[in-house]
Image (cartoon, rainbow, N blue to C red):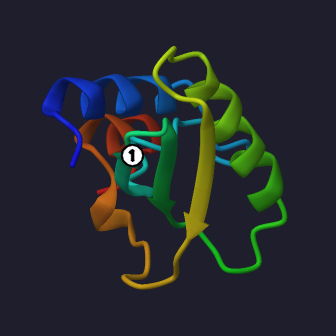
Amino acid sequence: MIDADMKESMMGALENVIDPELGIDIVNLGLVYDVDLDEAGLATVTMTLTSMGCPLGPVIVDQVKTALADLPEIKDTEVNIVWQPAWSKDNMSRYAKMALGVR
């Protein structure tokens, strides 16, 4: 179990990963469901994509790995793409909704 500061650092790094289609970061879009870090420095990111057929999935996964690699505690990153629970606009932060004009 990681501490709140580390989790915050990881989520902060992930805010640098921008969804290429929507132009908003994956954290504010609500795509990141969980982050974890084990003692060996393996980060696990559980996230989803806005659509199952998202052609940019591999690009986003690479960007997640690159963003987390900036944190000295992280040696490697595993990204688990999940489809449950399904993503919806309700997952988005107020900032993302305002930026995209979603109500």
Left or right: residue 5 compared with residue 28: left
Residue position for label 1: 38
Using the rendered image of the protein, determine whether residue 73 is visible from the camera's viewpoint: yes
Secondary structure under tag 1 reads loop
Residue 86 percent location from the top left of the image: 43, 81
Residue 16 is drawn in which quadrant? Answer: top right
Q: Nearer the viewer, residue 28 or 60?
A: 60
Using the rendered image of the protein, determine whether residue 49 is visible from the camera's viewpoint: no
Give the crowd class for mark 1: few <14, some 14-19, many >=20 residues within 10 Å: few
Please give the name of the residue rendered at 60% of the width and 30% of the height, measured from the top-left corner: 75
Please give the name of the residue rendered at 49% of the width and 44% of the height, measured from the top-left corner: 43
From the viewer's perspective, is residue 54 above or below residue 102? below
Q: Nearer the viewer, residue 54 or 78?
A: 78
From the viewer's perspective, is residue 32 above or below residue 19? below
Which amino acid lies under the numbered mark 1 shown in the image of this protein? Answer: Asp
Q: Nearer the viewer, residue 45 or 47?
A: 45
Please give the name of the residue rendered at 33% of the width and 53% of the height, measured from the top-left corner: 92
Left or right: residue 49 compared with residue 86: right
Residue 56 percent location from the top left of the image: 80, 56
From the viewer's perspective, is residue 25 above or below residue 77? above
Residue 53 is drawn in which quadrant? Answer: bottom right
Please give the name of the residue rendered at 75% of the width and 60% of the height, measured from the top-left corner: 57
Q: Quadrant of the C terminus?
A: bottom left
- In the image as oriented, which residue stretches furthest toward the front? 40
Residue 101 percent location from the top left of the image: 41, 45
Left or right: residue 98 compared with residue 24: left
